[in-house]
Image: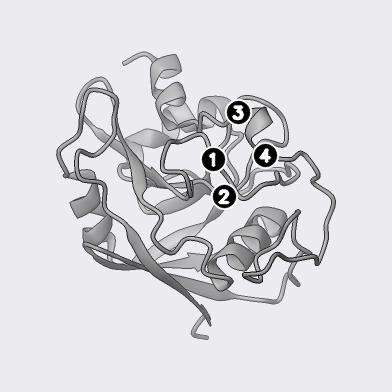
Amino acid sequence: MRTTAVVLAVAATLTLSACGTDASPNTSANANGCPTSQPATLSSDVSNDIAFETTLGTFVVRLAVKNSPIAVSNLTALASCSFYNNVIFHRIAYMENGTPFVIQGGDPTGTGMGGPGYFIKDEPVLGAYRRGVIAMARSSQPDSQGSQFFVILDDAAAEPLESVRTYAILGEVISGMEVVDAIAALERNGEDRPIDPPKIISTTVTPSAP
């Protein structure tokens, strides 16, 4: 397995011209209530879960705002305003040896080139990459995270991800990992795209259980 090939498989191929580059915190919103620039950062005491209802079932992510305050606040804001409704998982990536790597979604265009219309600031990456972890996808450019995310399918992903360690860790799947695996098992074309892409039906943000 070539580490470079694997890293490129998971990185979001965002084009900087596709979105604005204002990454200053802002409370402004569009007509749907979604942010138009980097949202205000949540308190470190806040603890939320996000349920992703998909066409193949529901999986629930417990967020770790203390690890990535900016990125988690951004994901929470986008999920709260229904930004991800009807957005597909456009990428299912495997390692060269056949090991499942990640599923990736969050692009409203479904192409792997889109985002929310803004980028967020980078921050130190805290936490460990392992099966079930959800992290922000990005390009190789600084401050290039927007709305795309990926879920890690296998602990073997840790090595290539750690080799760059630029993907902000948002939290971890606490239920429904079998749904993530079902998405990963879908038939793909030659470029890691599902032939019949599964869709996020809705996202529900709730306070984490104590």
Which of disc 1 and disc 2 is earlier in sequence?
1
Q: CA distance from mark 2 to mark 1?
A: 8 Å
- Callout 3 environment at 10 Å: few (<14), some (14 to 19), or many (20+)? some
Q: Which residue is labeled 4 in the image?
A: 19
Q: Classify residue 184 as left or right of residue 163.
A: left
Does the residue at mark 2 contact the one at mark 1 (Cβ under 8 Å)?
A: yes
Residue occupying the point 67% across, 26% down: 141
- Residue at 65 percent across and 59 percent down: it is 74
**Residue 175 lies in quadrant:** bottom left
Look at label 4 and name its amino acid: Cys
* Residue at 59%, 60% in the rendered image: 75
Q: Disc 1 vs disc 4: Cβ atoms closer than 8 Å? A: yes
Q: Which of the two discs, 3 and 2, labels the residue nearer the N terminus?
A: 3
Residue 155 coordinates in the image, percent (x, y): 34, 41
Across and down, in percent, residue 71 comes to 65, 54
Residue 5 is left or right of residue 73, and the answer is: left
Mark count? 4
**Residue that mark 3 sits on:** 15
* First of labels 1, 3 by sequence position: 3
Which residue is at a point 57% across and 39% down the rendered structure image?
A: 167
Amino acid on which the number 1 mark rests in the picture: Gly
Which amino acid is tagged 3? Thr
Name the secondary structure under disc 2. Answer: loop
**In front: label 2 or label 1:** 1
- Disc assigned to residue 114: 1
Horizontal side of 13 relative to 34 (left or right) equals left
Q: Is residue 124 above or below residue 175?
A: above
Closer mark to the observer between disc 4 and disc 2: 4
Of labels 3 and 2, the one closer to you: 3
For the residues marked 1 and 3, what is the alpha-carbon distance in whole angstroms? 8 Å
- Residue at the spot of label 2: 147
Looking at the image, which is closer to me, 173 or 33? 33
